[in-house]
Image (cartoon, rainbow, N blue to C red):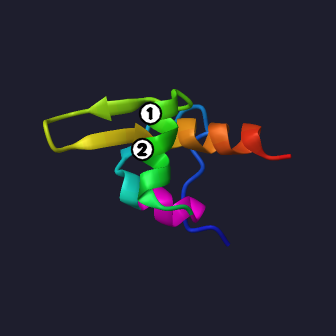
Amino acid sequence: MNSFPDPIRNPHTPAKFVRAKYLAARFGVCPKTIFRWADAGFIHRHKVTARTVLFDEAEIEAFIKSARV
């Protein structure tokens, strides 16, 4: 069973913003990969402070699902 909530299936769930480290662990990629996707324009980064960058978990999940063959 997946221990992570699925924000895409439940439209009433508010957007969940998380750090790249959490997303990397969840999707099995390196945290640098998350930042590379943002640099390439595939996903958006949300800069909260000078040292805090968050990503929308649902946006990352949608990107990964669209990239699968």
Give the residue drawn at x 42%, y 57%.
Answer: 31
Q: Secondary structure at mark 1?
A: helix
9 left or right of 31? right
Q: Is residue 24 magenta?
A: yes
Chain part drawn in magenta: 22-28
Give the residue drawn at x 49%, y 66%.
Answer: 25
Within 10 Å of the Cα at label 2, are there few (<14), some (14-19), or many (20+) other Cα atoms?
some
In the image, which disc is placed on residue 35?
A: 2
Q: Which residue is mark 1?
A: 39
60 left or right of 39? right
Residue type, numbered disc 1: Asp
| Marks 2 & 1, CB-CB < 8 Å contact | yes
Residue type, numbered disc 2: Phe
For the N terminus, the quadrant is bottom right
Q: Measured along the vertical axis of the image, is residue 52 above or below residue 12?
A: below
Spatial CA span between label 2 and label 1: 6 Å
Residue 13 lies, in percent from the top left, at: 50, 38
